[in-house]
Image (cartoon, helix red, strand yellow):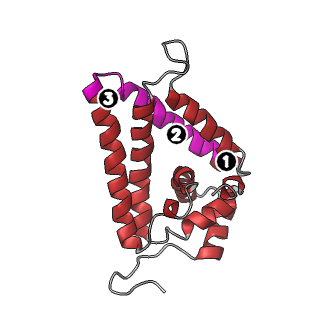
Amino acid sequence: MASSLFLPADELMVRYARYHRDERNIATHLVGVPMIVFGLGVLLSRAQLPPGDAGPSLAWVVWTLATLWYLSRGHLLLGAAVSLANALLFALAHLASAGTVAQWLSWGLGFFAVGWLVQFVGHYYEGKKPAFADDLVGLLVGPMFVTAELLFSLGLARSLAQEIERRVGPAVLRNMAHPMG
């Protein structure tokens, strides 16, 4: 795991894409990953550092550290885009966490759990375990992958899309009657 933490974005994306070639799995990630990020943001938004009302929430500390990591992977557009997307989700998460403790936990745990459920449905279609099962860095790469897929759909980051397809093939609809070889 530690060695993959320092890989460039293109290599991280290729490794992650090896677990995500079924179009249905990619589609579930477009829904599930933002739900997980939002749920995590909700859960971390009430903790202040340092404790009290003066410091940033733990959510913003985590966002800052993740942003530094994303921006240091060597693909500025992708790093900036995923950081911006995560910032939007965390800002919305702070709004959702403002209610009662029951509301805060319902939003946070609900989105987090349903997001993971959606992910596991996608991996059923893929016929492979989630990438993080082999490398926990995949938990950071997931939001980057989803953002990259959105960039690709807008015609951006074409060289990254081409590199992924060259190395792991295009996204397909896996025939559920026949295992992948």
Residue 111 located left or right of residue 66: left
What kind of residue is marked 2?
Asn
Quadrant of the rendered structure where residue 2 is?
Answer: bottom right
- Residue under the image location 71 percent in, 51 percent down: 75
Residues shaded magenta? 79-102
Determine whether 72 is above or below 12 in the image.
above
The quarter of the image holding the N terminus is bottom right
Q: Would you name the residue on which mark 3 appears?
A: 104
What kind of residue is marked 3?
Trp
- Residue under the image location 35 percent in, 36 percent down: 108
Query: What distance separates the C-alpha of mark 1 from that of mark 2?
Result: 14 Å
Q: Would you name the residue on which mark 2 appears?
A: 86
Query: What distance separates the C-alpha of mark 2 from that of mark 3?
Result: 19 Å
Tag 3 secondary structure: helix
Q: Position of residue 28 (x, y in %)?
A: 38, 59
What kind of residue is marked 1?
Leu
Q: Which mark is residue 77?
A: 1
Between disc 1 and disc 3, whose residue precedes?
1
